[in-house]
Image (tube, rainbow, N blue to C red):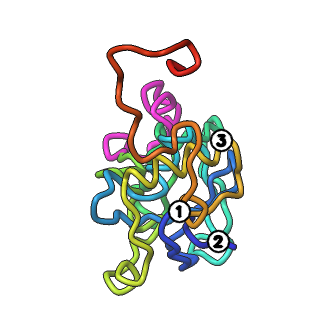
Amino acid sequence: EWACRYCGIHDPASVMKCRGDGKWFCNSRLPGLPSSCIILHLVRAKQKEVQLHPDSPLGEIVLECYNCGQRNVFLLGFIAAKSDSVVVLLCRVCLSNNALKDSNWDLGQWQPLIEDRSFLPWLVKIPDAKEQMRSWHITAAQVNKLEELWKANPDATLEDLEGKSGPGLEDDPQPVMLRYEDAYQYL
């Protein structure tokens, strides 16, 4: 149920749920992909809210700004308390407005939750090499096709891509002809 929809990794500490569509993705950056599975999906699907797995070390929480409730993960970061071992999630807007004027927080130490196109490992674990070796090896082209397929069929899987074609799912575009016999051939 909570396995990554791209690569199949299912460790609760390594996966996050996209709140926009309810799909699970991991924080693994597989060879050939430009970012981690969850970041890649959020960007491709134009989503921005995530939730941790109930069995993850931090529990089932929705990532949001402590001050204003902003849930856009691309705007969120964290700051640590000066004395305690406590961190607070704070969005860029609240940071720039000096929303936390309490002297317990060092606003200069704010860091984004996303670094090098994946979530920070203390928030969502990056799967180890053994888990990544056992995962499905998906290409960026397959990710793009799967995202297109999900627009029409949200329950589609990687297996549904094999042997299927449709708008935007062909392997190669049709070659352009110099002359067409009629309008139907042109379309």
Position of residue 25 in the picture relative to residue 151 (left or right): left
Could you tell me if the residues under marks 1 and 3 are in contact, i.e. CB atoms within 8 Å?
no
Could you tell me if the residues under marks 2 and 1 are in contact, i.e. CB atoms within 8 Å?
no
Position of residue 28 in the picture relative to residue 12 (left or right): left
Counting residues from the N terminus, which is met first, the one under dot 2 or under dot 1? 2
Counting residues from the N terminus, which is met first, the one under dot 1 or under dot 3? 3
Q: Nearer the viewer, residue 74 or 82?
A: 74
Give the label, 2 or 3, closer to the camera.
3
Question: In 3D space, how far apart are the residues under numbered discs 2 and 1 (Cα atoms)?
Answer: 23 Å
Identify the residue at horizontal 57%, vertical 54% (top origin): 164
Q: Nearer the viewer, residue 162 or 25?
A: 162
Image quarter hosting the C terminus: top right
Counting residues from the N terminus, which is met first, the one under dot 2 or under dot 3? 2
Q: Which residue is mark 3?
A: 151
The percent coordinates of residue 85 (x first, y second) are 45, 67
- Residue 124 is a magenta residue: no
Say which mark, if any, is on residue 162.
1
At label 3, counting other C-alpha atoms closer than 10 Å, the crowd grade (few under 14, some 14-19, many 20 or more) is few
Dot 3 falls on a residue whose secondary structure is helix
Part of the protein shown in magenta: 91-110
Identify the residue at horizontal 47%, vertical 69% (top origin): 7
